[in-house]
Amino acid sequence: MMKTIRTITLAALMLAALPAKSPAQTLPQDTTLNRTVVVEQEYTPDIRDAAKVNAVPAVEAPVVQPKAVEYDNRLQPLADIPAGNMPAYTGRQALPKATPGYLRLGYGNYGNLDIRANYLFSLSPKDRLNLTFRMDGMDGKLDLPGSTSKWNSYFYHTHAKLDYRHAFRQVDMDIAGHFDLSNFNFLPGAADHKQRFTAGDFHIGIASTAKDLPLQFQAETNLMFYQRQHEVSFTDVQEVMARTKAHVTGSLSDEQTIGIRAGMDNLFYRNNPFSNHTSIGFNPYYRFDNKAWAFHLGVHADPTFGFGNRFRVSPDIYAAYRFARSAVYLQAKGGELQNDFRRLERFNPYAQATAQPAATYEQLNAAIGFKTGTLGGFHLHLYGGYQNLEDDLYTALPADGNYTFTLGTWDTANLYAGAEISYDYRDLIAFTAQGTYRRWSASGQGEDLYVLAFKPVLEADARIDVHPISPLRVHIGYRSVTRDRYNGVKADPVTDLYLGGSYEFLKILSAHLRIGNLLGKDYQYYPGYPAEGFNFTAGASIRF
């Protein structure tokens, strides 16, 4: 007991000797048997998982144990193998094919005849054969200019064509044959009362189609026959012409091209004193086009041998700057127009050649123009320039009492300005209008020789096409041509107000109506020869 008391007493003395943590704290009075001990220490709490880092456990790739492949080496009879499997079907969009055949028949009040026929044979994916037939004309009484008499006029033109095309791997070849026949009569009192033109030709040509060839080329040759039944001084005049053309181009880069065009006409005549001759034409050029700028720099060199022995040169230059669907351009062009009998017929079938005409040569056709268009279907073209023609064709007017018109050539020139405008709205309505004004002049005493008597001064044409419903189409137009003066007098202008329309039945059959010269005006397309008055042609068409 005594030992225990000593121990307690010693522990109490040691605790009393320690310094107090808080002097301000008052402790209860200690006694020997009752000793209070206060222990203070700083508190630092521990937050569990405060330093824990979330980590995705590593994923171990599965290990595949390869197995040995076992093949069936047993013999299989051939008869047990299926002959074929059904291939997978893949749909392909394709536009509906146009019908290959077409036929149109029409007849009018002046005996107007209108026949058109065409059929395209698709012999194979590489072979095409196209047949075309056309016949038009009239037979009726027309009012003679400046007279109360009538002229029983007729004029029929027949055209037939066969065209075959074969596509080789890199070249297309086409072979064609044409036949034309014109039958008509002259004014009463002319030297010859009837006339007949017969023409035919054979054509063969090739053209490259592979874009990877270093040179692109086109070449053709034509053997052409022509016969006129009557001339003023000759009968059964015959012309044979071999016409050859070639065109070769090569690309220097995506923007630069060089090329050359070449042609040769060999003409031979029978039953008239015309001279056989050869005309050659060369047209080398360089072209640059980078979508903004376009340049075409070339020259025409045209020698003639056997008739005239001439060598004439003209420019072949074109430059354009394009911007915002518009373009401004400059040009200086020229070249030769062969006055063979085919061109004489197109110029004036009623005029006859008393002497061999030289080829018309466009020495210069210089112009400046502006073109613009919009996505809305509006287009505008303004232009103006100067044209110089050597040996230009004209119709010589006969003396009083003579009804035979002859052809001649003379040097002429003209200043011109014109405009073209068009608008098309969603295939519902379309409007086009164009007009050209020319101021003519002739060298020497040409103005006293009727050279400018029928030259056009103002040519204008306007037309409106309306498509109100799917099967119906209607158009109305007006054409006007005023002529130059001769000794203060000029021919009546062409004033043709025309109307037409068509209606489609069953998508293959349609009916059409065309009305010309609604105003019933008197005018002449060719000197001395009247055109039809109020006229119409009605007919039907079928596609098959």
Image: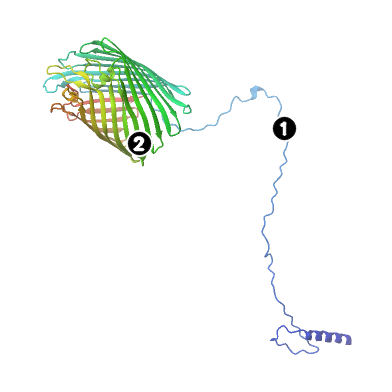
Q: Residue 503 location in percent, x, y?
A: 29, 30
* Residue nearest the viewer, comparing 136 with 396: 396
Residue topped by disc 2: 320
x 70%, y 24%: residue: 75
Do we see residue 125 in this rendering?
no
Q: How many numbered marks does the figure carry?
A: 2
- Relative to 429, residue 44 above or below: below
In the rendered structure, the answer to whether residue 371 lies left or right of residue 82 reads: left
Which quadrant does the C terminus fall into? top left
Q: Helix, strand, or loop for circle 1? A: loop
* Residue nearest the viewer, comparing 111 with 191: 191
Which quadrant does the N terminus fall into? bottom right
Q: Nearer the viewer, mark 2 or mark 1?
A: 2
Q: Residue 342 location in percent, x, y?
A: 28, 18
Do we see residue 37 in this rendering?
yes
Quarter of image, res 478: top left
* Residue nearest the viewer, comparing 121 with 91: 121
Residue topped by disc 1: 70
Q: Residues within 10 Å of mark 2 (few under 14, many from 20)?
A: many
Tell me, for residue 231, which label it has, or none: none
Q: Residue furthest left?
A: 148
In the rendered structure, the answer to whether residue 411 lies left or right of residue 267 reads: left
Q: Residue 498 location in percent, x, y?
A: 22, 30
**Disc nearer the start of the sequence (2/1):** 1
x 72%, y 32%: residue: 70
Quarter of image, res 473: top left
